[in-house]
């Protein structure tokens, strides 16, 4: 059994910064940060930091079923991720053979040794025994004595796997498939990358949080595979017998002043193309949830609402359903993963064409990171707006994408991808070559 004890913390922000420093010495490490984003439906998880592991789950055959067994056996808090490419186990006709220089494992989950929670101004630590509590206090003393490493100045720029001209040709090709009825909408992604990179990922993540203040931000270290994520999007949440999914489709930049900001927000709200994209994915999510939900319980609670973030406005919908209390977690993920906002419609065909037209393997990008409670509830994000870094190889990657429909303008889609990369490049203090 894990027991929680209150922690006396004078400065919550400084304490979180100290805990992040532990990720240099302890792996696995996962920080889930809501950045106190206001008024996001069902977003009341505060912030949590999971440090060290009692038990871990890594890739293996029959992955999802064994993952479900791992969750039921642990009966404890679990943190971790699935990469986009576990789709290949859910649907055997799929494969992922594109370039993969990041070399992240397809999944990783762990039962943390130390779990620090931040809720409504109070801080607590969850441990399984008193000895762990004593060890944690020793860790904190150690980290306070270590001089915090400053952010290193970037000495590199990012390269794109695809030229603008080739990107436009590929989008035109996808539009031909849409015209032929093979697909109706597809999320098409491109990679920016750099090699031989030596960065300190901690201040990069801290800078990213300052820039974006996204409600589903993550800092993750698994054996020097780092994720710095500023995601605004929830994939799926379970709250007892209720499932909540909140796909994002529709993006526009923030204005330089209040007047322009309101005009841009209204422009997105009234954009028929963006609304059509969003509604298509809402229908896909409704179909996915219906597979494992009680009859006639799938509901669209909000459709195409506009939410404002630090760098962009986003169009978000909320779909909910009711499930039987004894449905296993792996059945829920088999029915719903990958998320519709990162695939397209019809889902299977969209995933096949993504593999054909994209150059880089998505890996953890378009995947999901989150937590599971001892009771089997969970909350998982969509891994977008992210910097992925293989520290051992010195390989850095940013992927961005947009939804392609028949009405898509390739130039505009390319510009949307660069807009989504803007905050990430700013956090790194780099540009695209």
Image: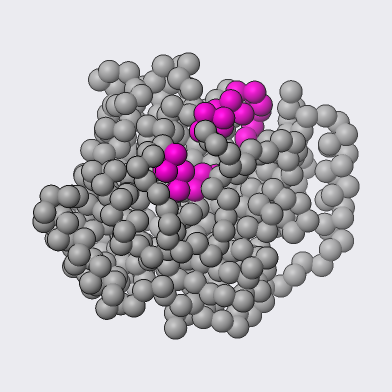
Q: Is residue 16 above or below residue 246?
A: below
Q: Which corner quadrant holds the N terminus?
A: top right
Q: Which corner quadrant holds the C terminus?
A: bottom left
Q: Is residue 71 magenta?
A: yes
Q: Is residue 311 magenta?
A: no
Q: Position of residue 312 (x, y in %)?
A: 36, 62
Q: Is residue 160 above or below residue 405?
A: below
**Residue 6 vs residue 170: left or right?**
right
Q: Position of residue 377 (x, y in %)?
A: 52, 28
Q: Residue at x 11, y 54 (%)?
A: 180
Q: Residue at x 39, y 20 (%)?
A: 323
**Residue 301 vs residue 361: left or right?**
left
Numbered-mark total = 0
Magenta stretch: give its range. Answer: 64-89
**Colouring mode (rainbow / by chain / secondary structure / one colour):** one colour
Residue 407 quadrant: bottom left
Q: Residue at x 61, y 29 (%)?
A: 70
Q: Residue at x 34, y 22 (%)?
A: 293
Residue placed most toward the observer, 295 or 204: 295
Task: Say whether residue 237 is visible.
Answer: yes
**Residue 103 vs residue 122: left or right?**
left
Q: Position of residue 78 (x, y in %)?
A: 62, 35
Task: Say whether residue 259 is visible.
Answer: no
Q: Is residue 396 above or below residue 367?
A: below
Predominant SS of the magenta segment: helix
Residue 297 quadrant: top left
Residue placed most toward the observer, 253 or 350: 350
Residue placed most toward the observer, 6 or 32: 32
Q: Position of residue 373 (x, y in %)?
A: 59, 29
């Amino acid at each position: 059994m894990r027991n929680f004890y209150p922690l006396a913390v004078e400065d919550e922000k400084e304490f979180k910064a100290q805990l992040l420093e532990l990720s240099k010495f302890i792996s696995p490490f996962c920080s889930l940060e809501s950045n106190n984003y206001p008024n996001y439906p069902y977003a009341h998880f505060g912030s949590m930091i999971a440090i060290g592991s009692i038990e871990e789950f890594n890739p293996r055959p029959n992955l999802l079923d064994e993952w479900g067994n791992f969750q039921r056996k642990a009966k404890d808090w679990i943190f971790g991720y699935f990469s986009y490419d576990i789709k290949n186990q859910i649907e055997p006709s799929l494969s992922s053979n594109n370039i993969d220089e990041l070399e992240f494992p397809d999944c990783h989950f762990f039962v943390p040794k130390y779990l620090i929670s931040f809720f409504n101004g109070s801080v607590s630590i969850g441990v399984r025994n008193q000895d762990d509590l004593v060890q944690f206090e020793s860790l904190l003393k150690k980290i306070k004595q270590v001089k915090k490493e400053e952010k290193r100045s970037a000495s590199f720029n990012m390269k794109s796997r695809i030229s603008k001209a080739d990107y436009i040709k590929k989008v035109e090709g996808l539009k031909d498939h849409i015209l032929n009825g093979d697909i109706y909408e597809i999320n098409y992604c491109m990679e920016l990358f750099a090699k031989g990179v030596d960065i300190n990922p901690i201040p990069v993540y801290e800078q990213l949080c300052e820039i974006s203040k996204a409600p589903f931000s993550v800092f993750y270290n698994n054996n020097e595979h780092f994720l710095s994520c500023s995601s605004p999007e929830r994939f799926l949440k379970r709250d007892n017998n209720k499932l909540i999914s909140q796909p994002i489709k529709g993006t526009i930049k923030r204005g330089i002043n209040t007047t322009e900001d309101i005009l841009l927000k209204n422009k997105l709200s009234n954009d028929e193309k963006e609304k059509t994209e969003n509604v298509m994915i809402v229908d896909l999510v409704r179909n996915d949830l219906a597979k494992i939900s009680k009859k006639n319980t799938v509901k669209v609670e909000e459709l195409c609402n506009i939410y404002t973030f630090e760098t962009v406005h986003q169009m978000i919908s909320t779909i909910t359903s009711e499930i039987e209390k004894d449905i296993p977690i792996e059945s829920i993920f088999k029915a719903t993963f990958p998320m519709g906002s990162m695939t397209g419609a019809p889902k299977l065909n969209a995933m096949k064409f993504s593999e054909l037209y994209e150059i880089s393997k998505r890996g953890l990008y378009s995947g999901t990171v989150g937590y599971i409670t001892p009771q089997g509830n969970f909350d998982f994000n969509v891994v977008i707006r992210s910097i992925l870094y293989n520290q051992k190889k010195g390989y850095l990657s940013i992927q961005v994408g947009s939804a392609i429909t028949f009405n898509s303008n390739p130039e505009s889609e390319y510009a949307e991808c660069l807009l989504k990369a803007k905050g990430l490049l700013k956090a790194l203090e780099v540009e695209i070559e």
